[in-house]
């Protein structure tokens, strides 16, 4: 595919395709099977409250996570909030800023202070040495995130948590069906939390789950998920409503049946991106450890403007004009979002890696909705921009529209 940069849609040309490509277009399993399940649910007239489809979904989750308890919930954020509360976290909890905002909000929502910790530049996950330096007498827990489906430094975080008597919760929203050290994600820390949002590898429209091997914790979580009810008329705990619906679980079961197809599509896309973007200066595609199980749901690229000659934000604008809705997750970093930026205006000083990643990361479309032709199209646009960076800079300088940041 030959792209001439002066003819890019951003400069007034026509987009390379009218097809809009998204990051997070849902993976859909067999629609006929989903329709059958919906029919059964409607005939049964059992729509929520631990119905048979939710129970079957939980059993199937156990087969993937290997955890003893797998509690299906209405979304990943409520799952985080419930897990945090059931674990008894209070005071301060150490968490990366380089994550989706829900990880921190789930703490702040309960008036627990998120203490932002920097990440390792190679893994994008919590740096355990920096975590150790942030522990204070007020610290009650650590939340590690398996960002992009790549496991965080679980072993070191477990050691640290046990040495200091802290709770360790793992936000595994991205890491369903992934592994760490050959063991499935789901059984580490005190509990792990999954998201089954529409944009996730396996989806239940909206949904989530908590996996744990701790019997007491699991029963507290189950109580909290259903208002604290331990039977008709008997509330023995403070609770909320975190229940998953039957139709959501039906979508989950349907998704699980096609899980291997989803992985295969993601892996094929990722490998093709790797081939097509290879050798471009300043363009680093994040790798996956292929010895571990992975869902390959995220195609993450880091753009180093000094080497590439183009800034990530220029590429975003150019790609969007071409109908490629690439994303700059998790810009500008949670510590720069409200209320955190008002509470901790200088947090960035201790988060140099997170700050740099927020300027460089570009997430590209993948999933079963796209294939080889689309990957080739996205890659060709990026390649054309980087290979013609000097000409691109000249064209941008001549634009009336201001393009930030200005590299000149
Ligand atoms: N922890 C981590 C580390 C997380 O990443 C997340 C969620 C959570 C916790 C919390 O879990 P949940 O409470 O969400 O279960 C998305 C998702 O809303 C969010 O689930 C996800 N992380 C985050 C990384 O991404 P946005 O702002 O990108 O969503 P949105 O609406 O822009 O959708 C992305 C693209 O997907 C759109 O361009 C269009 C496409 N799309 C989306 C939906 C919903 C579709 O084609 N069809 C659809 O149905 O946040």
Image: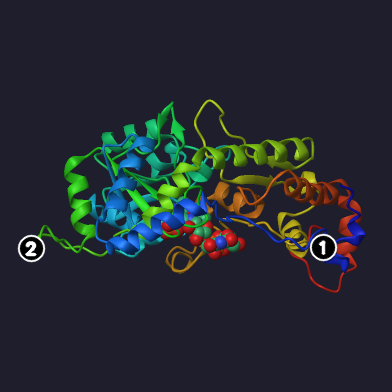
Instruction: Judge by depth and name the residue closer to the eye, 341 or 80.
Output: 80
Residue 98 pos. (x, y %): 51, 51
Residue at point 26%, 52% (across, down): 89
Residue at point 27%, 34% (across, down): 163
Residue at point 84%, 64% (across, down): 9
Q: Is residue 375 left or right of residue 239?
A: right
CB of mark 1 near ligand 1 (< 8 Å): no
Residue 379 pos. (x, y %): 77, 47
Q: Residues within 10 Å of mark 2 (few under 14, many from 20)?
A: few
CB of mark 2 near ligand 1 (< 8 Å): no
Helix, strand, or loop for circle 1?
Answer: loop
Q: How many marks?
A: 2
Q: Is residue 132 left or right of residue 325?
A: left
Q: Tell me, yes or no, if residue 195 can be seen here.
A: no
Q: Determine the image quadrant of residue 186.
A: top left
Residue at point 42%, 60% (across, down): 206
Answer above or below: position of 393 versus 11: above
Helix, strand, or loop for circle 2?
Answer: loop
Q: CA distance from mark 2 to mark 1?
A: 61 Å
Name of the residue lying farthest toward the bottom: 400
Residue 333 pos. (x, y %): 54, 57
Instruction: Judge by depth and name the residue closer to the eye, 50 or 98.
Output: 50
Q: Which residue is mark 2?
A: 234
Q: Tell me, yes or no, if residue 172 can be seen here.
A: yes
Q: Quadrant of the C terminus?
A: bottom right
Q: Is residue 236 left or right of residue 15?
A: left
Q: Determine the image quadrant of residue 311.
A: bottom right
Q: Which residue is mark 1?
A: 15
């Amino acid at each position: 595919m030959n792209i001439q940069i002066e003819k890019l849609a951003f400069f007034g040309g026509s987009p390379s395709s009218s097809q809009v490509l998204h990051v997070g277009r849902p993976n859909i399993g067999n629609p006929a099977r989903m329709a059958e399940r919906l029919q059964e649910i409607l005939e049964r007239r059992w729509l929520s409250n631990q119905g048979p489809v939710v129970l079957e979904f939980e059993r199937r989750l156990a087969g993937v996570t290997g955890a003893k308890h797998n509690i299906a919930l209405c979304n990943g954020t409520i799952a985080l909030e419930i897990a945090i509360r059931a674990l008894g976290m209070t005071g301060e909890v150490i968490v990366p800023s380089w994550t989706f905002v829900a990880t921190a909000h789930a703490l702040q929502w309960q008036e627990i202070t998120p203490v932002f910790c920097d990440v390792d530049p190679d893994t994008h996950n919590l740096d355990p040495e920096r975590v150790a330096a942030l522990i204070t007498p007020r610290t009650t827990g650590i939340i590690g995130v398996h960002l992009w489906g790549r496991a965080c430094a679980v072993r070191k975080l477990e050691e640290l948590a046990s040495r200091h008597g802290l709770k360790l919760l793992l936000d595994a929203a991205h890491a369903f069906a992934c592994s760490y050290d050959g063991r499935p994600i789901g059984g580490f820390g005190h509990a792990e939390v999954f998201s089954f949002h529409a944009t996730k590898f396996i989806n239940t429209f909206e949904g989530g789950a908590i996996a744990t091997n701790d019997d007491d914790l699991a029963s507290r979580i189950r109580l909290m998920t259903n208002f604290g009810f331990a039977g008709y008329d008997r509330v023995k705990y403070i609770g909320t409503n975190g229940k998953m619906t039957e139709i959501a679980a039906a979508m989950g079961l349907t998704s699980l049946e096609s899980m291997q197809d989803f992985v295969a599509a993601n892996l094929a896309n990722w490998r093709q991106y790797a081939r097509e973007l290879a050798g471009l200066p300043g363009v680093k595609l994040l790798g996956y450890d292929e010895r571990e199980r992975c869902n390959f749901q995220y195609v993450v690229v880091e753009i180093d403007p000094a080497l590439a000659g183009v800034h990530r934000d220029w590429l975003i604008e150019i790609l969007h004009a071409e109908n490629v809705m690439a994303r700059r997750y998790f810009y500008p970093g949670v510590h720069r979002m409200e209320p955190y930026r008002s509470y901790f205006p200088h947090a960035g000083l201790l988060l140099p890696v997170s700050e740099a990643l927020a300027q460089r990361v570009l997430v590209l479309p993948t999933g079963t909705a796209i294939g080889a032709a689309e990957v080739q199209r996205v890659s060709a646009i990026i390649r054309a921009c980087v290979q013609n960076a000097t000409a691109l800079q000249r064209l941008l300088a001549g634009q009336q529209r201001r393009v930030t940041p200005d590299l000149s």
